[in-house]
Amino acid sequence: MSQAQRPSRFAVILAFGLVYLFWGSTYLAIDIAVQSIPPALMCGLRFSIAGVVMLGACALTGHKIWYSARQIVLSAVVGILLLMGGNLTLSWAEVTVPSGLAALIVAITPLWFLVLDSLLRLPPDSHLARSCKDDVLVVTTSAASAERRKRLESLGVRIEVMERKDGRASLQGVVELLGREKYLSLMIEAGSKINWSVLESGVADKIFFYYAPKILGGLHSLPVAGGVGRRRRNDAIKVRNVRLHSVATDEFAVEAWLEKPL
């Protein structure tokens, strides 16, 4: 791109701000609309009006708006999958789910699948490995099998060796790696031991717990955070800015920021 074609700094900031404003406010607008308009009717009216406006803009600016039958069919397929499969189901969900929570769930669509596997036990014939499209990162240790590593890498799985002094995969190393590669957000959905390691290491900034009215119990049930834990209440990991999100009639989620030691 030549210097003459390069957009001004103001234009870039303005475009970025408009994306934040219109895209971000979509969830709130849907939440308000579905309180009085059925989701399907609301989506139909929304996109019909948008289509008329876009066709009018194309006509005024002289853009071609006549397409072949094949192009129309392809556009219809995209419209059905995106507008009905995506926006309609989102609108239907916001009848019961708060707009903030809906936006959060949509935003956590992963760019990478990150696996902590100290011994590299991930099977090469697993669905995660076979469906890899250069979007799976496995963090392991020097104890990993060289042969399995080679097989996984041949499938497009990225393997990184990062280990702590105790021989386990390093969470701190993972966070530093993602930071160097300009990733600003990491969602960790793990088991009891990993959850505790994340909390204890201090790499997490926020927690999001989902609660449903189902009690399993049992002497061998797993806590949300296993590991060594803290014996005294004064030593407990504390949170701040707690927010409750109503998910359904009997279900809710807790969002909070973790307090970091000084």
Image (tube, rainbow, N blue to C red):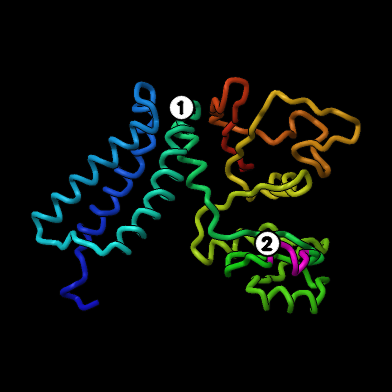
How far is disc 2 from disc 1 in space, using C-alphas? Answer: 33 Å
Quick one: label 2 or label 1, which is nearer the N terminus?
A: 1
In the depicted structure, whether residue 75 falls above or below residue 50: below
Q: Residues within 10 Å of mark 1 (few under 14, many from 20)?
A: some
Residue range highlighted in magenta: 122-129
Q: Which of the image's four quarters has the C terminus? A: top right
Tag 1: amino acid: Val
Q: Residue 49 location, x and y as percent?
A: 23, 40
Left or right: 153 in relation to 220: left
SS assignment for the magenta stretch, majority: loop
Mark carried by residue 128: 2
- Answer with the quarter of the image where residue 207 lies: top right
Q: Determine if the magenta segment contains residue 27.
A: no
* Residue 43 in view: yes
- Comparing 254 with 168, the one in front is 254
Residue that extends furthest to the right in the rendered view of this protein:
219
- Comparing 195 with 21, the one in front is 21
* Residue that appears at 62% across and 67% down: 132
Q: Residue 219 location, x and y as percent?
A: 91, 31
Left or right: 183 in relation to 220: left
Q: How many marks?
A: 2
- Answer with the quarter of the image where residue 174 lies: bottom right
Q: Residues within 10 Å of mark 2 (few under 14, many from 20)?
A: some
Q: Residue 231 location, x and y as percent?
A: 83, 33
